[in-house]
Image (cartoon, grey):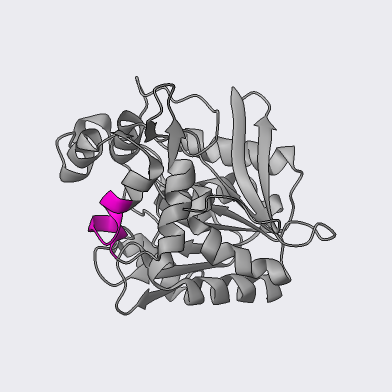
Amino acid sequence: MDLTVSEATRARLIDLAGRGGAMAGYEFGPLDRPIDIVFIHANGFNARAYAPILAPLGDSLRVLAVDQRGHGGSTLPTETEGRTSWYDLRDDLLALLSALDLRQVILAGHSMGGAASVLAQAQAPERVRSLVLADPVVIPPTSEAEVVSNSPLVQGALRRRAVFPSREAVIAAYSGRGAFASWSLAMLEGYVADGFRDRPDGQVELSCAPAWEASNFTSHGHDTLGAFEAAQVPIRILRAEEGSTCRDHPRLAALQAAGRIRMETVPGTTHFLPMERPDLVQAALREAVEA
């Protein structure tokens, strides 16, 4: 299994002042132009899983895909005690935009990454040109008392096997199964490459610890709907037809009716829409840059 990064893909490690660590990621495209797009992954995944989708955009655009805290190669701290929201993810993204002095950039994200993008643009509209979101997590804010810690998502994360003999063993275990059933081999290999880290005993273990993945499923005290309403930039949402995390809500419907967001349900897709329709995601990103 070839896990090398191509010459056209540049690994990045960006220190975030005041955040306690650095954000890792990959960059695609020409260095002689500003960064066009910053892409943020879903809970439990990493930037490299999306490389087969984003790398082709590097033929003319400059794209930066980053690992959120607790994922991939990022070194930002992951304290779950007392955590109630994704505002830490929002603030990491704001620190990234500041560290690189990005302006008029397109923020794009999948699932949790889409929600972090919405939350960030509400705080720094001067740095964001538009949003392209693939099945973002959009639910009303919940209090700690409302969080169901024994939900299937939380329990599934906590039961997830964390250690394997090798990355090849992970590929064999995941191929064609569960969430990965609709993924190409290149996407799965990218996910496994950075989704697991080497252990001293020669085995590999999840980069995103099960407890951190579970924390992301239970920490919903942030106000994503309010961030949508505060948006001052164009927003496009590609929504899954089956099992979408972009919930129907009157406040979101009102924004769509007012023309403040553009939302379309993509036939035949699940929550893993970017992996199932990379062509559509690529086209949406190119359109956003050209707008």
Q: Is residue 86 left or right of residue 245?
A: right
Residue at 50 percent across and 38 percent down: it is 89
Residue at 77 percent across and 44 percent down: it is 101
Comparing 20 with 125, the one in front is 20
> Residue 238, relative to residue 125: is it above or below?
below
Q: Is residue 50 left or right of residue 35?
A: left
In the rendered image, residue 273 lying in the magenta stretch gets the answer no
Please identify the residue farthest to the right as the structure is shown: 32
Residue at 52 percent across and 40 percent down: it is 90
Q: Is residue 146 visible?
A: yes
Q: Which residues are magenta?
A: 172-181
Comparing 203 with 134, the one in front is 203
Q: Is residue 237 left or right of residue 11?
A: left
> Residue 161, relative to residue 106: is it above or below?
above
Res 217 quadrant in image: top left
Quadrant assignment for the C terminus: bottom right
Residue at 59 percent across and 22 percent down: it is 20
Q: Position of residue 61 (x, y in %)?
A: 71, 67
Q: Position of residue 207 (x, y in %)?
A: 42, 34
Please identify the residue farthest to the bottom as the structure is shown: 267
